């Protein structure tokens, strides 16, 4: 008969310097660039020899990048999984190689990999709550008595796209004025957001509200709407998530209503959590990041710190 061996997390030795892996998923938007920079900036302060890669928007390449980091003998892995399912084998492989893994900013499918078992912890925002807060702000601030809503989703199969949709859809359904007539992916990218908005405008020229899962797509949508002769901020309300410089500027300019923050500055939190783990502390399965909300009331005072 066989005896099941309980899998426990790989420990992290306390030492002077660590070889740290950060396999970034893509670098095609300011959020990703700010996150990568946060890791680079933290490396010196936290005594990391940082190995970072750029998967160029491919989950398969991100899996291969993790493989190569394992081969290079990293001590610890900070992984932002591009999509929820394809990165699971990478998480399990790192665990099998005795490398403690922290998921940063995005998570993996909870049915297939677990915090405290396959990886130490997820460091990140509550994406469902972000979507809910956008919906609640929209319900409170949309003045008409009927609204045609278009949703621009993030990368298909990613945790922020899944959760930001769920949080928004559930909350907006509580107000019968709002009807979501279309919900399509713009892959979290400005250009794709603009293209998808152009197409959706053909079928829904009467759109009243655009909810984008991130600011880059919101800015793309604003460009498409303006090209079609619409006036964002006047005859169509744009609401979104992240808190980039361009979005805060769009709020200041009156083109966008709200953006719920999703911070990309994970470096310091990664350093601190890793040190706690190395000291033998038990780490909570989800180290939750608290997000602010940016509107006309505070965009100007916050733009100086935006990315
Ligand atoms: O995972 C966080 C999301 O990824 C950000 O909201 C988005 O801009 C980025 O690409």
Image: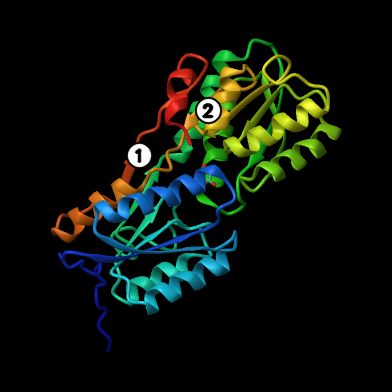
Q: Is residue 195 left or right of residue 31?
A: right
Of residue 3 and residue 235, the one placed in the foreground of this image is: 235
Q: Residue furthest front?
A: 44
Secondary element at image label 2 = strand
Quarter of the picture holding the N terminus = bottom left
Of residue 222 and residue 51, the one placed in the foreground of this image is: 51
In x, y percent, where is residue 126? 42, 39
Image position of 131 with respect to 120: above or below = above
Of residue 167 and residue 63, the one placed in the foreground of this image is: 63
Residue 289: mark in rendering: 1
Residue 17: mark in rendering: none
Q: Which residue is mark 2?
A: 259
Q: Is residue 182 left or right of residue 73?
A: right
Image position of 210 with respect to 236: above or below = below
Secondary element at image label 1 = strand
Note whether ligand 1 is within 8 Å of mark 2: no
Upstream in sequence: badge 1 or badge 2? 2
Q: Residue at x 57, y 38 (%)?
A: 214
In x, y percent, where is residue 303? 47, 26
In x, y percent, where is residue 233? 67, 17
Q: How far is the residue under mark 1 from the one under mark 2?
A: 16 Å
Q: Residue at x 53, y 31 (%)?
A: 245
């Amino acid at each position: 008969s066989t005896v099941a061996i309980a899998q426990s997390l790989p420990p992290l030795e306390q030492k002077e310097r660590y070889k740290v892996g950060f396999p970034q998923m893509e670098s095609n938007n300011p959020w990703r660039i700010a996150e990568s920079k946060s890791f680079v900036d933290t490396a010196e302060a936290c005594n990391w020899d940082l190995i970072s890669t750029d998967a160029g928007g491919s989950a398969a390449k991100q899996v291969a990048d993790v493989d190569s980091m394992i081969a290079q003998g990293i001590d610890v892995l900070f992984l932002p999984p591009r999509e929820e399912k394809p990165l699971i084998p990478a998480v399990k492989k790192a665990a099998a190689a005795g490398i403690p893994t922290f998921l940063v900013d995005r998570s993996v499918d909870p049915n297939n990999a677990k915090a405290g078992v396959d990886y130490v912890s997820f460091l990140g925002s509550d994406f469902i709550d972000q979507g809910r807060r956008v919906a609640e702000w929209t319900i409170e601030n949309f003045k008409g008595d009927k609204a045609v809503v278009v949703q621009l989703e993030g990368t298909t199969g990613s945790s922020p796209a899944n959760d930001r949709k769920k949080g928004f859809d559930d909350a907006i359904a509580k107000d019968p004025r709002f009807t979501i007539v279309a919900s399509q992916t713009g892959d979290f990218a400005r250009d794709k957001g603009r293209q998808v908005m152009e197409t959706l405008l053909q079928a829904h020229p009467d759109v009243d509200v655009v909810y984008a899962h991130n600011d880059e797509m919101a800015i793309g949508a604003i460009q498409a709407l303006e090209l079609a002769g619409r006036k964002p901020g006047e005859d169509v309300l744009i609401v979104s998530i992240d808190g980039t410089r361009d979005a805060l500027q769009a709020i200041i300019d009156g083109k966008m209503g709200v953006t719920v923050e999703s911070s990309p500055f994970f470096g310091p939190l990664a350093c601190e959590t890793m040190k706690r783990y190395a000291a033998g502390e038990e780490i909570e399965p989800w180290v939750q990041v608290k997000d602010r909300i940016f509107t006309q009331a505070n965009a100007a005072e916050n733009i100086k710190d935006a990315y």
